[in-house]
Image (tube, rainbow, N blue to C red):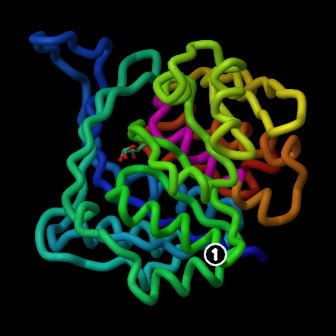
Amino acid sequence: MTAIAVLGSTNMDLVAYVARAPGRGETVTGRELRTVPGGKGANQAVAAARAGGEVVMIGAVGTDEYGSRLRTELDHAGVNTELLHTVAGPSGTAHIVVDDDGANSIVVIPGANASVTTLGPGGRAAIAAAGLLLLQLELPMTVVTEGARTAKERGVRTILTPSPVQPLPEDLVDAVDLLIPNEHEAAELTGHRDPHAAAQLLLRLVPEVVITLGRKGCLYAARGGEPVLFPAPEVTAVDTTGAGDTFVGTLAVALGEGRSVPEAVAWASSAAAICVQRHGASTSMPYRSEIDAA
Ligand code: RIB
């Protein structure tokens, strides 16, 4: 089995469910508050482990009670947490509003994630020993770039989720094999709302791109090939939080098993479709048997 290294964030998600998200300066009354383990890195790690991957997580939690819950959640999912450091201070938190269409908006406070500024010998060794590296942008850019460069030197395939979206340094994108933005991130990175146009521009930076398009599915494009639009299964979403992370974690497992990109994308789309029908991030991620059954 190909090992997957995840260099990324852990956050406790504080999720407010409301009929409609408040506008600027507005107060609305919500229905319910849930506290759910999340963070883009941890979500991708949990999704990959539940899909059958062998996963090691590199990151940090704080010394607050969220920190131990975040670690336990990863341990329960079967993720190797030996390189998940505990640092003095609060864990990362995400303040999430989910509306009745299942759409969300998120504010992340990095907490312990901000302390992960370099890989250290353990992190470098874990990446070198992996077949795939998953990166997002909730850790400092210095360590994300160091992770990507380390992977490139060792011939490890790197997948980057450019979220929260921000300008991508050249030495980072040079080391990325597959970029997976959502449609908003793709538009922000390229200035083009049309995913086909955005994909062509992103292919100047990286060899392969998947732009996730929510209920419209996703667009896969590779240098020198025709772009392919994959439809999403039709489902009713109650909470889209973590759907992108589920897609990436599951896709990584399928690619690590040597499946073709179309097959891997179809499998990952089924996993994301299951995720959006449930509440929360890590809590909504499906197990391999559920994905296969779908
Ligand atoms: O991608 C979803 C995740 O983004 C949430 O779990 C939250 O922690 C934020 O990092």
Q: Determine the residue positioned at 71% across, 51% down.
A: 251
User: SS of the residue at dot 1?
Assistant: helix
Label 1 beta carbon less than 8 Å to ligand 1: no
User: Height in image: 75 above or below 262?
Assistant: below
User: Height in image: 175 above or below 268?
Assistant: below
Q: How many neighbours does mark 1 have within 10 angstroms: few (below 14), some (14-19), or many (20 or more)? A: few
Q: Does 114 sit left or right of 136 as displayed?
A: left
Indicate the position of residue 24 as horizontal and vertical percent values: 16, 12
Q: Would you name the residue on which mark 1 appears? A: 153
Q: Is residue 122 visible?
A: yes
Extent of the magenta region? 239-251
User: Height in image: 56 above or below 11?
Assistant: below
Asked if the magenta segment contains residue 249, the reply would be: yes
Secondary structure character of the magenta stretch overall: helix
Q: Say which quadrant the N terminus sits in.
A: bottom right
Indicate the position of residue 117 as horizontal and vertical percent values: 30, 69
